[in-house]
Amino acid sequence: MTKTRIFSGIQPSAGSLHLGNYIGALMQWRDLQDDYDAVYSVVDMHAITAPQDPAELRANTRATAAQYIAAGVDPSKSTLFIQSHVPAHAQLAWVLNTITGFGEASRMTQFKDKSARQGAEAASVGLFTYPMLMAADILLYDAQVVPVGDDQRQHVELTRDLAARFNSRFGDTFVVPEARILSETARIYDLQDPTSKMSKSAASDNGLIRLLDDPKRTAKKIRSAVTDTEREIRADRQAKPGVTNLLSILSAFTGTPVSALEGSFQGKGYGDLKGEVADAVVAELEPVRARTLELLDDPAELDRLLAVGAERAESIASETLAKVYERIGF
Ligand code: ADP
Ligand code: NA
C-alpha cells in the first residue's frame, strides 16, 4: 500500500527555531514520517515576503534545515529540501495566481494582519500572493494531508478551492488536500505573556525559548516564567494560563497527560513545577542543539543531504508541473 503524502514547511526567518516550532511542528513531523510519505521544506521563498539580509537568510536557511534533522526528521525517511532549490514552486505559483480572484486573495486574514503591521506602502505584492505560493508547495506533491497550526487553516482552505477550480476548468490534475490542525495541547505560549502564542516576534526575549540557546539560559527563562498568585497546580487556560503552559510543555516532553501531571504535583509548589519543566526542556533540547552545531560544522555533509532531498522533490514536482503546463496549453 502506498503511504499518504503529507507536506509541511517552516520559514527560515530566524537563526534558531523556538519551543513552539519544536512541539507544534518538528516533534509531530518526526512522529509522522514513519506512517506517511512526508515532504518537509525550508520555505525560504516565503521568507523573502518580508525584507531579509541575504547572508543572514542563507545562514538561517541552513540552520533551519539542520534543526529539522537534529530534531529527528530523517532525510532517508522523509524528503527534506530547500524550497528555492526546486523552481517548480515559483512556476506553479504563477499559474495559481492567474486562477485566484483578487477579492478572494484580499480576504486572507494573515495578509491583512501582516500588511497592517508592515504598513500598506511597505507590504510587498509577494506578501499578498504568499497563499498561492503555499498552495503550489502543497499541490506540487499531491499532498493529501497538510499538518499545520490553526492560523494556516484559511490558506489550506484556499488551496483546496484552487485545486478543485483548476480540476474543473482543465481536467482532473490536483489532489484536493486536507488540513490536519494540530491540537490545542501542542500550542505553546510565551513564558512572560502566557496568553500570547510563543513566537519569534515575541515582545520580551525572556518569553521565548530558542532551540539553540545555551541550556543555562533556557533553564533560567523557565524558572522566571509568569504564573499566578495562587498555589494550585492545575490546567485552566483562562484562569491560569502560565501554569497551564508549563504543564503542556512538561506533558509534551514526558508523554504524561496533563491530568496525570496535575495529580503528581499535588501538595507541591510552582518552584517544583518550574524545576521539572526546566530539567525536561534542557534534557530534550541539549542533544538537538549539539547535533545542529555538528551539522553546521560539516557544510559538505549538510549540502549533500539537501541535494538528495532537492533531487527527490524535483522529480515529483516537475512531473506535476509538466501535467499542469500541458493542461493549460503551454
Ligand atoms: P512564528 O509564530 O514564530 O512566526 P511560524 O509561524 O513560522 O512561527 O510557525 C512555523 C510552525 O511552527 C507552524 O507549523 C506553526 O504551527 C508552529 N508553531 C509556531 N509557533 C507555535 C507555538 N507557539 N505553539 C505551537 N506551534 C507553533
Ligand atoms: Na506565524
Image (cartoon, rainbow, N blue to C red):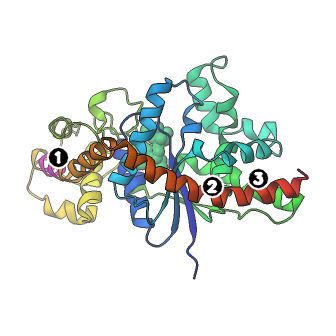
Distance Cα–Cα, label 1 vs label 3: 45 Å
Please give the label number shown on residue 38: none
Q: Main secondary structure of the magenta part?
A: helix
Q: Earlier in the sequence, mark 3 or mark 2?
A: 3
Drawn side of residue 235 relative to residue 1, left or right: left
Total labels: the figure holds 3
Q: Amino acid at mark 1?
A: Ala
Q: Can residue 149 be seen by looking at this rendering?
A: no
At x 27%, y 46%, the residue is 294
Residue type pointed to by label 2: Glu
Q: Give, as a single range, the part of the protein colored magenta.
A: 273-279
The residue to which callout 2 is attached is 314
The picture places residue 248, in percent across and down from the top left corner, at 30, 54
Q: Position of residue 128 (x, y in %)?
A: 68, 33
According to the picture, the residue beneath numbered tag 1 turns out to be 278
Front disc: 2 or 1: 2
Of callouts 2 and 1, which one flags the residue occurring earlier in the amino acid sequence? 1
Residue at image mark 3: 162
Residues packed near mark 2 inside 10 Å, few (<14), some (14 to 19) or many (20 plus): many
